[in-house]
Amino acid sequence: MSNAADKPMNRLAVIAILIALVGTIIGLGAIDLVLPAITVIPIALGGTQAEAQFILGAYIAGTSIGLILWGEVGAKFDQLKLLVISLFCFSLVSFISPLMPSVPALTLCRFVQGLFGAAAAVFAPVWIRAVLPDRYIVPSFGLLASIESLTPAFAPVLGLWLLGLFGWTSSFYLLGALALLTVFALLGVKAIQPDLKVLGARGSYKSLVANVPYLKYGLSQAASLSGLLIFVFGMPAVTVHVLELKMSAFIMMQIIGIFCFILCANTSNLLVKRVGADMVILIGSFLSALAMLIMLAFAAYGIDHFYPYVALFTLVNAGLGLRGPPGFNRALQVSDGNEARAAGLLLFSAFMMTAAGTAATAPYVEYGMRELLAVSFIVLAISPLLLLSLSGSDLQKTGTP
């Protein structure tokens, strides 16, 4: 796969991208598909509920390290082969996990599972930029973002259904089977066109950290995503304990927000054509931060009606949807050919910001929402501030107009 700005699309390469997207879904789904089983696993294997929570944390920790790892090795070796290896190992660990005799042993498996499950999330966006003509890149990132947003919405529902019918082990077996099928599909593509290559072989993480435009675009993208996720992770407790509503109210909020995000993510390219990518990224960043700031003002004045927060949360999602696809593309674009590492570092930064923000707000979410909104706003505000700090000389270094 080579840069395809002026080339016709290679059908096999496009198929490889679609398969990589499936791998991304499997990696993301492994977080939420297992979520309903967390309350049951301590009963089956022994141990406490607190220990079982580490099963979730271990997967996220493994994924975080995996993002950096696959970004590095993906810049040096054939990414198609690496994705086959990663998904096969992911499948193997998924099949082994239900055989573990204790919660700590299962937690270790989940860490390894997350490590191998991160590869597709790094490679898929790089492949999109390598294969597709320029006019299709931002819409494809919109599609990728839409798929990623739907996965945490539906995976817990499927996990709950599997738990009720087949027990807690069924989610692991399903993940293993899906990953194995994806491996076979990738091997089919590899057999037909074994010389499929990808971009991202230049540079290092050191050179990436020294790349000021990448840092600003990448951290801006990570902050926009993290600010939303911090709010989402804290809002269930706020909904139940502070607003005294049922969990169904939060689910309704999530569904409306996801629908708006998908709508904006798949129409952002139309705005990019009219006003340019940088303006759309800036508008989306400001919209998300402004909507969160208004929510914070409402909470400060003691407004506890749920629906105004739903409406403003929808605007936060709209902002991320608008800026997400062109923002991710721009971050990779200014990485100076260091795209695999750039994708890994961007996603790693988003994970770390989310983890830090969630930890900072965790002690307060049962008692109020101002702290949650304040931290979410601070993180979201980083995004437009970084964009405004970009100078003409920053962009000239990378050849970006």
Image (cartoon, rainbow, N blue to C red):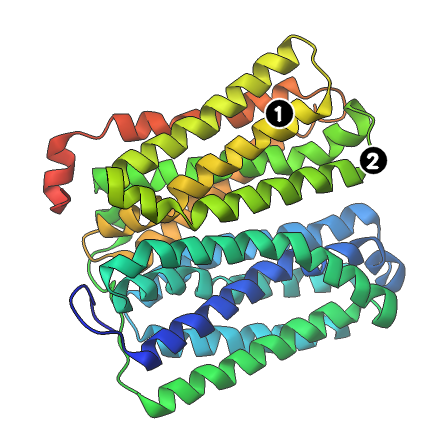
Q: Where is residue 115 in the image (x, y as percent from the top left)?
A: 52, 62
Towards the viewer: 257 or 81:
257
The image shows residue 270, relative to residue 169, as above or below, that is above
Q: Name the residue under label 2.
A: 246
The image shows residue 352, relative to residue 174, as above or below, that is above
Instruction: Answer left or right for 362 relative to 140.
Output: right
Q: Mark 1 points at which residue?
A: 372
What residue occupies the far top of the structure in this picture? Answer: 301
Towards the viewer: 387 or 73:
387
The image shows residue 364, relative to residue 144, as above or below, that is above
Q: Residue at x 69, y 26 (%)?
A: 307
Q: Earlier in the sequence, mark 2 or mark 1?
A: 2
| Mark 1 neighbour density, 10 Å: few (under 14) some (14–19) many (20 or more) | many
Secondary structure at numbered mark 1? helix
- Position of the C terminus by quadrant: top left
Q: Position of residue 327 (x, y in %)?
A: 34, 44
Q: Is residue 209 visible to us here?
A: no
The image shows residue 379, relative to residue 301, as above or below, that is below
Kind of residue at disc 2: Lys
Secondary structure at numbered mark 2? loop
